[in-house]
Amino acid sequence: MALRAILSLAWVTMLAVVAHANPDPDPHTTQTYHSGFASTDPSQAYFSVQVDSVPSHSLRFRPTPSFCDHTVKTFSGYLDAGYGSKHFFFYFFESRNDPQTDDIVIWLNGGPGCSSATGLFMELGPCRVTPGGNGTEWHPHSWNTNANVIFLDQPIGAGFSYADFGQTLDTTDQAAVDFHAFVALFFEAFPSFQGRPLHIAGESYAGRMIPVFASHIVDMNRKSTANTTAPINLASVLIGNGLTDVVSMVPSYYDMVCTRAGFPLAPISECVKIQNQLPRCIEWTKASCVDRMDEISCKAARDFCMAIMYPALFATERNVYNLAVVDIEKYLNRPEVRELLGVSPKVPHFQGCNMPLLLTFEEKLDRYHTSPPYVAQLLERGIDVLVYVGKNDFICNHIGNYKWANALEWHGGDAFRKETLQPWVVDGEVAGEAKTVGGFTFATILDAGHMAPYDRPVQTLAMLQRWMADRRLL
């Protein structure tokens, strides 16, 4: 009777899934059944996995039947890091097509400190939150149409992720270690997906993080042996409206609001002020924030640049993100939703973005550690890269992203610079412009802002499907 009380119908299903997927457990992997997750409710039973090679990390997860997408198997859980003192929350949705053959996509939102629930419930997930935050509705253009998709709240403090003793991360390099541990343990927990092509995707500040995370995976793969986790089959990265190179992005703000490359809507007087002071802004930023990493001088440069840029932007009365607000926070703070997901009671209130966490990264000048060199090294090692940008975005715009992409030094760099942008088409209509050389693609998306999958769901799903199929949009 006690066993029946513990094993809910959902958990029986889960045991069947695990038994089928992993009939011969790896001797270096410990798999454990537990009768509680984040509460004493028997339905909160969960499964945990630990690997000898990553002793400080473990993964616990449980099925979440009918959550968000009733047509597929869904799971939620935590990566417990730092010997159980830090906890990273994730959602996992199997593919609507063929989970046993389709690729894996991990989605990251930016910030740093913004929950990937934004991507899940507002952009590319299998459901969207209804007005008022009282429920969800089916999303027909979800990225799990042809892929198994994971949404991860990282770094620690983002979304439902938390630390027992107030620990924080303040650099992308630190976050890369936990990200690799999550990916490695995920494939141990779901062994039927081992060896499947993995694509790391995200937007905004994820443009800074993804190249570093992917590079860490490549480096750790080289260290894999028979006594460690299996190598991760990293196939590509997708950077959407990314803040990948600050030095390229800063001057592009002038182009976006004062020239026909963007939307010349700012007052002429403001544009003249920017034009006169922009060289000083660029020189000061590069010298203080990139070359010397002088915290005091860098902050002064940042404030100077903002002071000359932002009045022109606000004068246009345009939304810098082209963003509509959806009440995701209200939905994820509903007690029954938190209970279903197994959210720890140590997370008192869900917030879409953790501003104190963002400021800790800002204090370390993390955004000024340029990421394009990591992109170049990924391309040299055969990892494909897609950079896509909604053309209506201001804050991480297409001009700044195209500048660093074109300047990238890699074996195909000269050919990439010579290639011209060509229209790419979805359902007979131009979706944007793109160019591809080797494994590197740059693409724009028309009528899309900072969150392109929200603004153009059909086009971005087509983009993902073409990318996974043959790495070409044209």
Image (cartoon, rainbow, N blue to C red):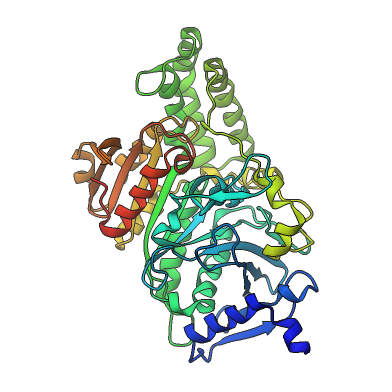
- For residue 409, say whether it is visible: no
Pick the residue in front: 91 or 82.
91
Residue at left 59%, top 63%?
Answer: 66
For residue 405, side relative to residue 22 (left or right): left
Please identify the quadrant where the C terminus is shown. Answer: top left
Residue at left 42%, top 72%?
Answer: 232
Percent position of residue 60, x then y:
64, 74
Q: Where on the picture, by quarter, is residue 192?
A: bottom left
Percent position of residue 361, x then y:
62, 47
Percent position of residue 186, x then y:
53, 72
Marks counted in the figure total 0
Residue at left 73%, top 80%?
Answer: 35
- For residue 8, say whether it is visible: yes
Percent position of residue 435, x then y:
25, 42
For residue 173, side relative to residue 422 (left or right): right
Outermost residue to the top: 269
Please identify the quadrant where the N terminus is shown. Answer: bottom right
